[in-house]
Structure formats: structure tokens, C-alpha cells
Image: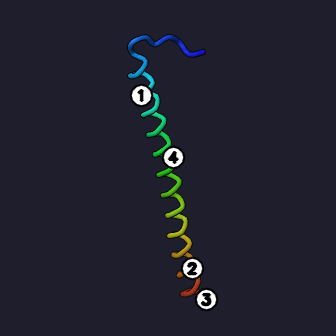
């Protein structure tokens, strides 16, 4: 299933691992920022409703 990488196995697998970690970090950061912005938007909307009503 996995090709023979020879003497480059450590470098190739390390690169794959680093890429997977970076992609996971970017996804996590995006989800965290999205949740933060949703909370901020909800707070602003709540303040507007209080001042309008």
C-alpha cells in the first residue's frame, strides 16, 4: 500500500505530518474565529434590540 521511500522516508513522512498538523491548525483557527465573530455579532444585535425597543 505504501511505496518504498528508501532513504527519504523520514523526510517525506515528516513533511506529510507537518502538513497535516498545519491544516488541522488552520481549520481549528477558522472555527475558533467563526465562533468568536458569531458571539460578537450576537452581542451587537442584542444591544441594538435594546436601544430600538
Q: Quick one: label 1 or label 3, which is nearer the N terminus? A: 1
Q: CA distance from mark 2 to mark 1?
A: 48 Å
Within 10 Å of disc 1 (Cα), the crowding (few <14, some 14-19, many 20+) is few
Q: CA distance from mark 4 to mark 1?
A: 20 Å
Where does the N terminus fall, quadrant-wise?
A: top right
Which of the two residues, 37 or 45, is positioned nearer the viewer here? 37
Which of the two residues, 23 or 4, is positioned nearer the viewer here? 4
Q: CA distance from mark 4 to mark 2?
A: 29 Å
Q: Quick one: label 4 or label 2, which is nearer the N terminus? A: 4
Mark 1 highlights which residue?
A: 14
Q: Residue at x 46, y 13 (%)?
A: 5
Q: Secondary structure at mark 2?
A: helix
Q: Find residue 50 and report its horizontal and vertical position in percent.
A: 57, 86
Q: Quick one: label 4 or label 1, which is nearer the N terminus? A: 1
Within 10 Å of disc 2 (Cα), the crowding (few <14, some 14-19, many 20+) is few
Q: Secondary structure at mark 4?
A: helix
Q: Find residue 29 and report its horizontal and vertical position in percent.
A: 47, 52
Q: Which mark is residue 52?
A: none
Which of the two residues, 42 or 31, is positioned nearer the viewer here? 31
Decide: is 28 above or below 43.
Answer: above
Q: Which of the two discs, 4 and 1, sits closer to the camera?
A: 1
Q: Which mark is residue 53?
A: 3
Image quadrant in which you'd find residue 7: top left
Within 10 Å of disc 4 (Cα), the crowding (few <14, some 14-19, many 20+) is few
Mark 2 highlights which residue?
A: 46
Q: Which mark is residue 27?
A: 4
Q: CA distance from mark 3 to mark 4?
A: 39 Å
Q: Secondary structure at mark 1?
A: helix
Q: Residue at x 50, y 64 (%)?
A: 36
Q: Which of the two discs, 1 and 3, sits closer to the camera?
A: 1
Amino acid at each position: 500500500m505504501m511505496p518504498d521511500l528508501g532513504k527519504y522516508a523520514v523526510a517525506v513522512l515528516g513533511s506529510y505530518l507537518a502538513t497535516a498538523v498545519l491544516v488541522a491548525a488552520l481549520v481549528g483557527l477558522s472555527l475558533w474565529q467563526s465562533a468568536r465573530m458569531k458571539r460578537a455579532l450576537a452581542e451587537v444585535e442584542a444591544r441594538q434590540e435594546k436601544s430600538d425597543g
